[in-house]
Amino acid sequence: MNNMQQHPPGDKPRRARKKPAGAGPAAPREFKAVVRRLPPHLPRAVFERTAAAWTPDDRVVWRSFVAGKLSKRAPAKPNTFARAYLAFASLEHLLEFAQAFNGWLFKDEKTGTEYRAQVEMAPFQKTPRRKPRVDYRVNTLDTDPEYLAFLESLTVDPKEAFAAAQSAEASTTATSVIAEDPKSTPLLDDLRAKKAALLEASEKRNALRKAKKAANDAALLAAKAARKSAGGPKVRGAGKSGGFDQ
């Protein structure tokens, strides 16, 4: 009981996180700094040459430079300062660079404007992942099919190669001509069948229309003949009295 740790009421003991199996060694820690308030028109090469004494490749593992911009509407719109990001391999190297470069004076020779650099710890300490890109085609030239075909073509007689190329081109041209003018394809057969069905349906409608018209004409003639035979001949010129003047 004496060896057990005491926890306040309601506070659950924290469990130690276990390292996943197969995980590689932890990446070395980096210390990222940002250099602000650099001249807007300062080239990257000038900055790197100025800070080269404190930022060699064995100390700085990652670096980035963001160019500034001179405003065309100054002083209404201020200039955009350039800035640089440096990730050091150790905190001692970062402190040494900050002590030497913080407040470094940059002076514009044309306008006489002075800019003093400001070194700070970067608020975001992570850097882009630097994963080496593996080219799987390295040392595979001897097995490349296109390269082997090229080597084989060097051993062929130029005249025979030209004749083979001409015959291949002729066969390809003939095949393309045949393919461009097919006599019958499933699509053409389907279009022909649809056209024939439409034509047959149109002929049936015309025949039905003619039959109806002939039946109507015959019915009208029969009705006229029936009315004529039922009513008799009509007398014209008779007066109301039914007689004629002598």
Image: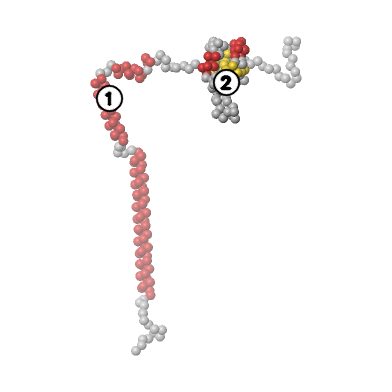
SS of the residue at dot 1?
helix
Residue where numbered disc 1 is placed: 165
Residue at left offset 29%, top offset 34%: 177
In x, y percent, where is residue 230? 38, 74
Q: Residue at x 59, y 15 (%)?
A: 104
Q: Is residue 4 left or right of residue 47?
A: right
On-image quarter of the C terminus: bottom left
Question: Splitting the image into 4 quarters, where does residue 155 fall?
Answer: top left
Q: Quick check: 179 left or right of 20?
A: left
Residue at x-position 57% and y-position 15% = 87
Estimate the x, y position of residue 181 in percent, counting from the top left.
30, 37
Q: Residue at x 35, y 46 (%)?
A: 195
Mark number, residue 192:
none
The spot of residue 2 in percent (x, y) is 75, 10
Between 66 and 221, the one lying in front of the other is 66
Q: Report the amino acid beneath label 2.
A: Gly
Three-letter code for the amino acid on which mark 1 is drawn? Ala
Q: Nearer the viewer, mark 1 or mark 2?
A: 2
Cα distance between the residues tagged 1 and 2: 73 Å
Q: Which residue is mark 2?
A: 112
Q: In the image shown, does 46 or 73 lie closer to the viewer?
A: 73
* Secondary structure at numbered mark 2: loop
Query: From the viewer's perspective, is 65 left or right of 193?
Result: right
Q: Residues within 10 Å of mark 2 (few under 14, many from 20)?
A: few
N-term-proximal mark, 1 vs 2: 2
The quadrant of the rendering that contains the N terminus is top right
Q: Is residue 28 visible?
A: no
Q: Is residue 237 above or below residue 151?
A: below
- The residue nearer to you, when weighing 97 against 7, is 97
Q: Residues within 10 Å of mark 1 (few under 14, many from 20)?
A: few
Residue at far bottom of view:
246
